[in-house]
Amino acid sequence: MNHFDEVLRNYQKAVLIGAYDRPPDGLFGKFDNVRRFWEDAVLRKSLRDFLKPFLHYKRSQFSRLRIIDLGCGPGAGYDLLTSPHRGGPIVFDEAMISVYKGVDISPDMIAKAQERYQGNPKCCFVIADLNDGLPLDDHEPPYDLYFSSYGSLSHLPDESLRRLLGEICAHMGERAVFVADVLGRFSYEWQCYWDEPEDGQRMRTYSMSYLYPPELREQMTERFPIRFWGGEELDRFITETVEHCGVKIVRKELRDRSILVGRHMDTGEFNPYAQPIRSVVNSLFEPNRRTDLTQLLFDYRPHPLHPDLNNFFERFQLAWNAVVAAALDELHCSHYTAWLGVESALEPLPEPVHQAIHMVRTSIRHSHLFCFDDPIANFVEPQLAYALRQLEQSLQQGLGCGHSLLAFYEFRKP
């Protein structure tokens, strides 16, 4: 049995237990609050900003978008791009899409996607293995957006991703955008993977144990190999591959997402020191539910061999804790800011930290003006979550330090 059989079995089981169905609340599961109001929102805004000049070009050509979703799962990419009911602004209006083609190795996922979009003539879905290259029919026209989301391309070993990129370069028209969403190698969730592999194997063991309640994880979880990427490493790989094909990169952007709220922060499966911060942020977003904010305070454990990463995480920890401490002090007249020494350690406060603290303090001081059943749970805590999300995106450096590494490229043929 090869590792793709293990991957297929994992996703088949996830579909059967309803992991890809919408839950009654946002505290747990595939579509929890962090997924909807943090991760989806970050991807949508980042992609929307990156696509603006490309969309302007397409409109100037009186042309709509042809999209291929590489590893589409149950077809969630279509909603991610167009639905007003996901976190953050839409990437573009549904009317801008001419064709959306979803590709996935899992028959169960494709069946779910076909059922979901059976009335939409723009959508088609194909069972295919991206290890075999770009799945195309004879004379299939080029696509404008070669899209992936939520780690789908991390399932590919390097040689398969190189082949896929080469076939994208051969198939594209004059201009195209490529979106890679892969697992970040330097996430605190798996500090054990930061070092170079001794055996030279780039694929490391991973699981989706977070889909299951703690009492069922051991018996239900499938483990399979997956590729983690650092920002510099991924950029070098894509650049060398594309330029070898004679295609030019005219714009690019790499962003870290979910630096402290990745799913395996809660499981601690790959790092015994990981704190369950995702579940705490899920609670911040949940209506009518108060949260113990002290559980947001982060204690970073340095890695002995990575001083540059330690420096990033130490600074990020201080900034994060400064915002949380400001909320605690304002709500409870406490002295967490002084006790932690975070503001003095960051003097002068970086502008993103200052803005986040100001946002949190202002929301607390004016919460009594709003007609909520519980202003703390329903107004202040969501504002704190949004402030922390904005802080993350202001301080991230595209190093691969988040659960996800987002990479946006515009390709152009000479």
Image: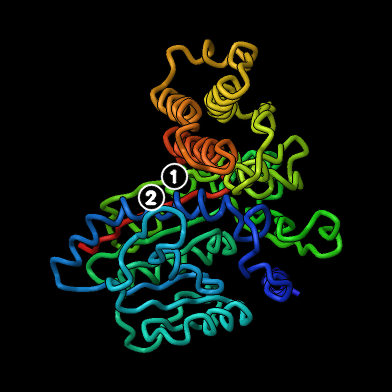
Residue 411, position as x, y percentages in the image:
29, 60
Residue at mark 1: 255
Q: Please tell me whether mark 1 sits on a helix, a strand or a loop.
A: strand
Which sits in the foreground, 242 or 204?
204
- Determine which of the numbered discs, if any, sits on residue 307 in the image: none
Dot 2: few (<14), some (14–19), or many (≥20) neighbours within 10 Å? some
Which sits in the foreground, 24 or 204?
24
Dot 1: few (<14), some (14–19), or many (≥20) neighbours within 10 Å? many
Which sits in the foreground, 153 or 61?
61
Residue 186, position as x, y percentages in the image:
59, 40
Which residue appears at 29% of the width and 62% of the height?
A: 246
Where, quadrant-wise, is the N terminus in this rendering? bottom right
Which residue appears at 40% of the width and 72% of the height?
A: 167
Location of residue 120 by image quarter = bottom left
Q: Are marks 2 and 1 in contact (CB under 8 Å)?
A: yes
Residue at the far bottom in the pictured view:
138
Q: Nearer the viewer, mark 2 or mark 1?
A: 2
Residue at mark 2: 46
Q: Is residue 384 visible?
A: yes
Q: Amino acid at mark 2?
A: Ser
When the figure is inspected, residue 297 is found, relative to residue 339, above or below; the finding is below
